Amino acid sequence: MKKENVSPYRWVILITAIPIIIATEMMWLTFSPIASIIAEHYGVSGFAVDMLATSYMIMFIIFCFPASYVIDRFGFRRSLVIGALLTGIFGFTRAAFAGHFAAVAVSQFLVAAGQPFLLNITTKAAANWFPFEERATADGLLTMAQYAGFAIPMVLSPILVESLGVQKMLFVFAVIGIIAMLCVLIFIREKPAVPPPGPAYEREKFSLSAIMALLRNKGYLLALAAAFISIGIFNTILTLIESILMPRGITSAEAGIIGAAFVVAGVIGAVVLPIISDKVGVRIKFLVTAVALLVPLYLGLTFVKSFPLLVVIAAVAGFSIMGVAPILFQHSSEVAYPAQEGTSLGMILLMGQISGVLFVLLFEAVSGASGSVVIPMIGIVILTVIEIPIAAKMKESKLIDQQR
């Protein structure tokens, strides 16, 4: 690698993108660890509160391809600006009109519309600014930002709503979103004057033919199937964490701590595992090992009653599933070559959001009909078992083989 071709401003790009990604994910899960409190405060059903989080999955499905189009046609900077404006502006209206549940819900859906414009830039930003051997690391740091955004409300929401009330809690999150939005508007640049070494993925523009080509790519389809299962399960657990744990005597505050352990360990995994993956030039072994490990861990989340043990189980599960996510994202971009990153990553994330909505609705329906969360949790375990042979069939990309 020629160091003189690598711009040091690449780290400014990451440092600028991280806060706005954290902000959107914070707003996604603001209500999840305090669902029962919010339902009582507004006098609405638990399902109505769950829809505040599910809004992100719904809006991602609607805006995923528009976001991918913007990224591949106009660049990731424009997409990041759109997402930042939606996050900052409607994060503020969510707080300003916090006295009315309908206004909060509308604002939440509009904030959610910005998420795909922020998340779909991950591999594109890495390709524009980073050499090939640093791209999984860059992906990992941007993915880590998502996880940090998950962890913060798990801990902060119960504390803030208890001490400040609902509206002031929402204003705290709004201020974070506005500051992050301003950072994007001031500091984000599209690309350096001299491209970094390595494949640039600049060959195919966003189009129906590019999407159809990906759907004929066996390696990419396997990544798509793995993402459908693993991201859908991840979204379901984060959305319904309180509902999953409370039947075993776990309080809202304890559920928040368990959720935070899940996410904080995932933040560490998202930094550590992609760096190791880049260093050794291996992706698939990490994916297979993580998926296999999740089977007994999800069983633990289903049956274990001990709060300290649940914290440990959640931490190991978070480290595993969240740590390999950026590796899966990078692998999908590599096997999708020469498709643009906005298209390939957008479809991966889209599958996860579709399955997230589906799994949440099925979880609610089955648990409601059976009167227990055990049956839908067993369903999650079975889906994870099914994912093991899917991950095992994946092969390392030609790009990673060439790099080795």
Image (cartoon, rainbow, N blue to C red):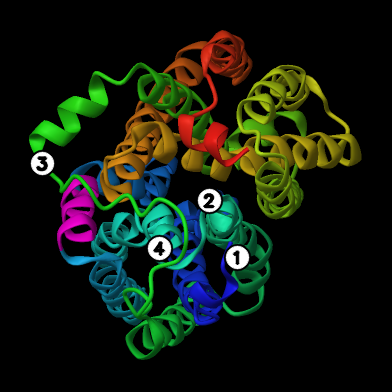
Which badge, 2 or 1, is on the more N-terminal residue? 2
Secondary element at image label 1: helix
Secondary element at image label 4: helix
Q: Residue furthest left?
A: 208
**Residue matched to label 4:** 125
**Residue matched to label 1:** 157
Q: Residues within 10 Å of mark 3 (few under 14, many from 20)?
A: some
Amino acid identity at mark 4: Ala
Whole-angstrom CA distance, mark 4 to mark 2, is 30 Å
Amino acid identity at mark 3: Ser
Q: Which residues are magenta?
A: 63-73
Residue 264 falls within the magenta-colored stretch? no
**Residue matched to label 2:** 32
Q: Residues within 10 Å of mark 4 (few under 14, many from 20)?
A: many
Depth check: give the residue in front, 110 or 364.
Answer: 110
- The quadrant of the image that shows the N terminus is bottom right
Which badge, 3 or 2, is on the more N-terminal residue? 2
- Nearer to us of marks 1 and 4 is 4
Mark 4 and 2 residues: CB-CB less than 8 Å, in contact? no
Whole-angstrom CA distance, mark 3 to mark 4, is 20 Å
Whole-angstrom CA distance, mark 3 to mark 2, is 37 Å
- Nearer to us of marks 1 and 3 is 3
